[in-house]
Amino acid sequence: GGQIVEDIPVFNSVQDALQRVGPADAASIYVPAVAAISAIKEAVRARIPLVHMLTEAIPYKDLAYMKELCKNNGIRLLGPGSLGILVVGEGRIGMLGGLKPEYRPGAVSIISRSGGMANEIAQYLLRHSLGIRTIVHLGSEPISGTSLVEQLHELFLDDGTKTVVVFEEVTHTAIQELHHALHTSDFLKKPLVMTFGGMSQAIIPQGVPFGHVDALMKRDARSLEQEIAALKDAGVQVVDSYE
């Protein structure tokens, strides 16, 4: 504490920072996995409403604890394993878009399970003259503080978002939770385009890993096809690739 880095003051704790600088709207956490719970607890004690966490490879028990801690205290957790969130022309938390994001503002928002694909899809849309409203990387850990359904709901309520593009992996929780939301309420308020990483698991032998930790949970190919078909029937445009 007391040092200055890149003209930004350094403090020994979140509480010290708030006492000196004032209230914070968000926290962005970059710590080793062993310190993740401690960092989350600091943010929760400070009642910071949005907590972003970059850290990966956090034990499952710690992931579950952090998610429940934030939920019980009314705090939104983005991540762990998330590159953050970017709202074009307004700002970002994390590192989406690289050192100097140069995205043209527009009305398409992106939700991605992969940080690399979040940037890739944004660049692809821009090359085809589609501006970007928001990019959100949910994180690649098996347990996410913000679910796909929760993030979709937020963007459906956002006046600046006209279409949502999603890159998801073939995890049972994400697809089934979305399927449930689509059939239990007036959920789908805007056009939704989805592509899934891991579809090739249907032809990959059991025991062969594929992609992020999420995608290591093997799915029955027939049930997956049925779930994708159900999403299409509910009005979701499911495409084979981002091209």
Image (cartoon, helix red, strand yellow):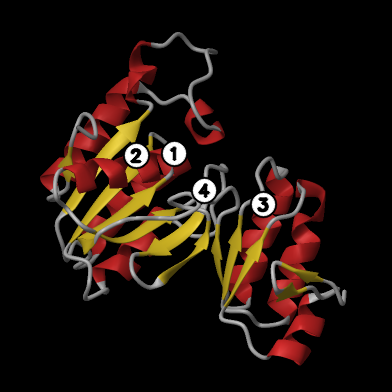
Q: Which residue is mark 2?
A: 120
Image-based side of 201 in relation to 128, left or right: right
SS of the residue under disc 3: helix
Q: Quadrant of residue 13?
A: bottom right
Return the disc, 2 or 3, that comes first in the chain's sequence. Answer: 3
Q: Are marks 2 and 3 in contact (CB under 8 Å)?
A: no
- Residues at discs 2 and 1 in contact (Cβ within 8 Å): yes
Q: Which residue is mark 1?
A: 116
Nearest to N terminus: mark 4 or mark 2: 2
Q: Residue at x 65, y 44 (%)?
A: 56
Most extreme residue toward the top, as rendered? Answer: 205
Q: CA distance from mark 2 to mark 3?
A: 27 Å
Residue type, mark 1 in image = Gly
- Residue 192, relative to residue 194: is it above or below? below
Q: Does 150 sit left or right of 26 as displayed? A: left
**Residue linked to disc 4:** 139
Looking at the image, do the residues carrying marks 3 and 1 touch, with CB atoms under 8 Å apart? no
Observer-nearest of 65 and 30:
30
- Residue 182: which disc? none
Q: Disc 2 on helix, strand or loop?
A: helix
Task: Determine the secondary structure under disc 1.
Answer: helix
Q: Residue at x 34, y 17 (%)?
A: 202
How crowded pointer 2 is (Cα within 10 Å; few <14, some 14-19, many 20+) is rated as: some
Mark 1 closeness class: few <14, some 14–19, many ≥20 residues within 10 Å: few
- Judge from the rendering whether residue 165 lies leftward or rightward of residue 17; answer left or right: left
- Is 115 rendered above or below residue 43? above
Figure quadrant of the C terminus: top left
In the rendered image of this protein, does residue 215 appear above or below residue 76? above
Question: Of circles 2 and 3, which is in front?
Answer: 2
Which numbered disc, 4 or 1, marks the residue closer to the eye?
1
